[in-house]
Image: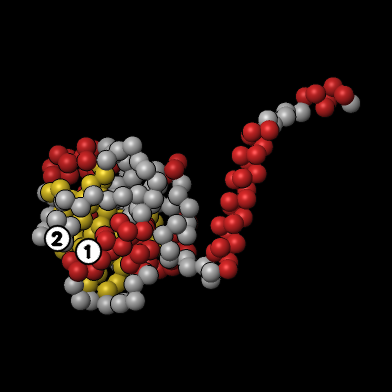
Amino acid sequence: MDDDDDDVPQLSAHTLAALQEFYLEQQQREGTKTSQGFNQYSVGSIEENWQLSQFWYSDETASCLANEAIVAAGKGGRIACVSAPSVYQKLKEQDDKDFSVVILEYDRRFSVYGEEFIFYDYNNPLNLPENLLPHSFDIVIADPPYLSEECLQKTAETIRYLTKGKILLCTGAVMEEQAAKHLGVKICKFIPKHSRNLANEFRCYVNYASGLD
């Protein structure tokens, strides 16, 4: 019996304290959601999954990008958010519903948003529902999950298929040349921020006269 006890791994006091703190924070988050009347559209209501290269925008950045999309789309406009769920969520929080929006996402947790959710895998950029007609969105906002030319090039196929013309791209500063090459977009003065600090510098790119400059 003693030998079996010796084989049981023991957590150090530091590790145990860290684990308890993690569970406490998790319980507090769940409690806050319940007590405040949980809003399924609030940024962060669905936790980031780093394995899927998910990093949510700060609330301020999400609001700025959502407002830019509304202005760019115009009255009664249609907006597509490609791999940009925090912008979609911020758009859904708007009181003024004089626009429509869809979210194209690989993460099926976002299927809680019903018919506005469209499963999307950038590896198959044109594998889209038949009812998603070409050039049917006034603006497309996209944030490709990976900083690679392959990912940007394939996402660009989707963007070009969906948009009537206007494009708002968020990706790394290192992708400036490729963004211009594949989408004809130029870098903006506005610098997007994330809720967690990322090592890579992020920027916004557009192909129209935007309010982000």
Q: Is residue 204 above or below residue 211?
A: above
Q: Quadrant of residue 101?
A: bottom left
| Circle 2 crowding by C-alpha within 10 Å: few under 14, some 14–19, many from 20 | some
Q: Is residue 17 visible?
A: yes
Residue 156: x and y in percent read 22, 49
- Kind of residue at badge 1: Glu
Lateral position of residue 116 relative to residue 40, left or right:
left
Q: Alpha-carbon distance for marks 2 and 1?
A: 7 Å
Q: Are marks 2 and 1 in contact (CB under 8 Å)?
A: yes
Q: Nearer the viewer, residue 27 or 162?
A: 27
Task: State the SS at label 2.
Answer: loop
Residue 68 numbered mark, or none: 1
Lateral position of residue 23 relative to residue 98, left or right:
right
**Residue linked to disc 2:** 210
- Kind of residue at badge 2: Ser
Q: Is residue 37 above or below residue 85?
A: below
| Circle 1 crowding by C-alpha within 10 Å: few under 14, some 14–19, many from 20 | some
Task: State the SS at label 1.
Answer: helix
- Give the quadrant of the N terminus: top right
Q: Quadrant of residue 4?
A: top right
Residue visible at 47% across and 66% down in the picture = 40
Earlier-in-chain disc, 2 versus 1: 1
